[in-house]
């Protein structure tokens, strides 16, 4: 049986959401973050080489990386319709959004968050300088990348109810958490009404609500 090793307040919530959407049996082990560092505790880090969440185990298999885990679970959950078939017209948009979530959007969002923390933790004397330098990285690299993705998402969601088309897919799960974080960080303010409405629809899904309830502590930290 697949067991989700679930780190509180982390990207692992995607996997919990997926398992709840599928309605399959799974094992669940909850881990709290280290109170001082807010990182994963040592026994979590020991699970996989990078020490990051999420991680699943299944017999002898230990697997990290969100999208690898999603594909692994979908390979095993026979008959699910969360990945459009190779010949389906939704296949290309599905692949785009499924991979853009972890390949482009989440890394840019995480980096933007890390830069903000770096500024906040810099000694006061040199903070203005560091703020200026890292602000340039935000402005020249991260913000345009996030905006381009947001603009495409808004256009796609103006035409369809879900990212890949008219059906809920794993791309919505991969991007859903990322978007939730983007919203918390104020990235959706004002100009993205279709995306906002979509996010509200995702948040209302019973499986997402069940995942939140099972986690019990999710507040949404932006990393
Ligand atoms: N690309 C990785 C990112 C994993 C990642 O950065 N996870 C964070 C949680 S959101 C983590 O493990 N943080 C705790 C730590 O690094 O100790 C994935 O999708 O699995």
Image (cartoon, rainbow, N blue to C red):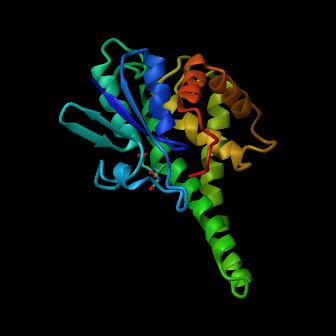
The foreground one among 29 and 202 is: 29
As rendered, which of 142 and 7 lies closer to the eye?
Answer: 7
Reply above or below: 202 against 181: above
Give the left or right position of residue 13, taking residue 190 as reference. left
Is any atom of residue 97 visible in this view?
A: no
Q: Position of residue 80 (x, y in %)?
A: 38, 15
**Residue at (29, 41) in percent of width and height:** 63
Rendered location of residue 37, percent (x, y): 52, 62
Count of numbered labels shown in the rendering:
0
> How far from the left and from the top, in percent, is residue 106?
53, 49
Q: In this view, which residue lies farthest toward the right?
A: 190
Q: Nearer the viewer, residue 20 or 112?
A: 20
Q: Residue at x 20, y 31 (%)?
A: 59
Residue that lies at the very extreme toward the top in this rendered image: 79
Q: Where 92 falls versus 186 (above or below)?
A: above
Relative placement, left or right, of 88 versus 151 is left
Q: Is residue 15 above or below residue 118?
A: above
Q: Quadrant of residue 156?
A: top right
Residue 156 in view, yes or no: yes
Q: Nearer the viewer, residue 133 or 70?
A: 70
Q: Quadrant of residue 124?
A: bottom right
User: Residue 178, percent across and down?
Assistant: 57, 42
Q: In the image as oriented, which residue stretches furthest toward the left?
A: 60
Quarter that holds the N terminus:
top left
Which residue is at a point 25% across and 40% down the rendered structure image?
62
Dividing the picture into quadrants, the one containing residue 198 is top right
Name of the residue lying farthest toward the front: 35
């Amino acid at each position: 049986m697949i067991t989700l090793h679930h780190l509180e307040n982390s990207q692992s919530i995607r996997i919990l959401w997926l398992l709840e959407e599928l309605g399959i049996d799974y094992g669940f082990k909850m881990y709290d973050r280290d109170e001082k560092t807010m990182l994963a505790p040592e026994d979590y880090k020991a699970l996989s080489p990078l020490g990051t969440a999420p991680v699943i185990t299944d017999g002898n298999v230990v697997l990290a990386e969100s999208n690898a885990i999603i594909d692994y679970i979908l390979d095993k959950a026979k008959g699910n319709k969360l990945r459009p078939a190779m010949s389906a017209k939704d296949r290309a948009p599905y692949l785009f959004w499924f991979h853009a979530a972890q390949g482009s959007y989440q890394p840019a969002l995480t980096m933007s968050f890390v830069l903000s923390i770096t500024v906040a933790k810099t000694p006061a004397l040199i903070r203005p300088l560091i703020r200026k330098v890292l602000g340039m990285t935000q402005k020249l690299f991260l913000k345009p990348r996030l905006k381009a993705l947001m603009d495409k998402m808004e256009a796609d969601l103006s035409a369809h109810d879900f990212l890949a088309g008219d059906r809920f897919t794993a791309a919505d799960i991969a991007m859903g958490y990322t978007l939730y974080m983007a919203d918390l960080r104020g990235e959706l303010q004002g100009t993205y009404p279709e995306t906002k409405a979509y996010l509200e629809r995702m948040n209302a899904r019973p499986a997402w609500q069940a995942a939140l309830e099972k986690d019990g502590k999710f507040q949404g930290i932006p990393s």
